[in-house]
């Protein structure tokens, strides 16, 4: 049996009936544009703290300034960064996986072989940054939402290709299984 030739840069398909291994296509996080305000806040807090340190009236001590700066940095810089870091999107040759959470991880998956619709929503700022939000829905399970996906058009094309390849493989394997079944 010969290996099928790829057309148009598509991945090589395994021979009929052979199990294909799951390969990683992409692993990414949401677009980091939301962290821009955190970076501006970090610079402003450091600049203000350096300016006001030892320059305040005697009643207002330096430790109060440092604790206020630490609180602002915790709320405005550290927490948004950790929230951004805790969400990961993974695309493999078999499924799409959305992982979120720090202490307890929440994981949702959607397989390519079942097929799903892909909706892309891009706001004005998302278009400026080349990002977008992808919603995957198969009509049975709850929709899977990939928020602020960087290079959203490339991810969309990848998902469409994976659905097509997986459905072709499933159809081909179903046909070969019915051909080799018991005859009457």
Image (spheres, helix red, strand yellow):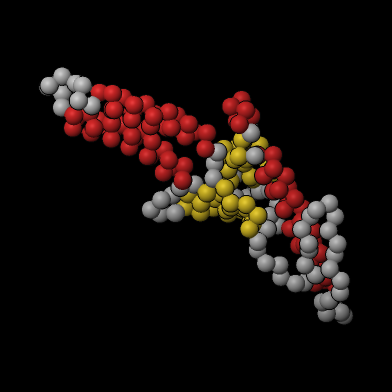
Q: Residue at x 78, y 63 (%)?
A: 13
Where on the picture, by quarter, is residue 24? bottom right
| Residue farthest along the top direction in this orientation | 57
Q: Inspect this view and state whether residue 123 appears.
A: no
Residue 158 spot, x, y in % from top left = 71, 48
Q: Residue at x 65, y 39 (%)?
A: 152
Residue 128 spot, x, y in % from top left = 62, 28
Residue 89 spot, x, y in % from top left = 56, 49
Q: Which of 99 and 43 lies nearest the eye of the viewer?
A: 43
Give the vertical position of 16 relative to 39 (above or below): below
Quadrant holding the N terminus: bottom right
Q: Which of 29 and 69 lies nearest the eye of the viewer?
A: 69
Q: Residue at x 75, y 50 (%)?
A: 161
Q: Residue at x 52, y 37 (%)?
A: 32
Instruction: Please state the total of marks drawn on the protein image.
Output: 0
Taking the image as shown, residue 121 lies to the left or right of residue 29, namely: right
Taking the image as shown, residue 181 lies to the left or right of residue 45, namely: right
Residue 130 spot, x, y in % from top left = 64, 33
Quadrant holding the C terminus: bottom right
| Residue farthest along the left direction in this orientation | 59
Give the vertical position of 73 relative to 142 (above or below): above
Q: Which of 165 and 85 lies nearest the eye of the viewer?
A: 85
Q: Inspect this view and state whether residue 75 appears.
A: yes
Taking the image as shown, residue 15 lies to the left or right of residue 80, namely: right
């Amino acid at each position: 049996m010969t290996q099928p030739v790829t057309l148009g840069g598509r991945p090589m398909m395994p021979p009929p009936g052979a199990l294909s291994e799951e390969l990683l296509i992409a692993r990414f996080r949401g677009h980091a544009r939301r962290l821009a305000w955190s970076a501006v806040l970090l610079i402003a807090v450091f600049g203000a703290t350096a300016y006001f340190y030892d320059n305040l009236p005697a009643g207002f001590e330096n430790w109060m300034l440092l604790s206020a700066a630490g609180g602002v940095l915790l709320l405005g810089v550290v927490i948004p960064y950790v929230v951004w870091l805790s969400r990961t999107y993974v695309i493999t040759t078999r499924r799409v996986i959305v992982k979120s959470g720090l202490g307890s991880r929440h994981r949702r998956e959607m397989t390519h072989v079942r097929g799903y619709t892909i909706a892309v929503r891009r706001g004005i700022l998302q278009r400026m940054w080349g990002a977008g939000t992808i919603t995957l829905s198969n009509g049975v399970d709850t929709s899977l939402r990939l928020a602020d996906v960087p290079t959203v058009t490339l991810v969309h094309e990848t998902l469409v290709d994976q659905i097509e390849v997986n459905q072709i493989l499933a159809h081909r394997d179903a046909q070969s299984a019915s051909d080799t079944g018991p005859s009457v």
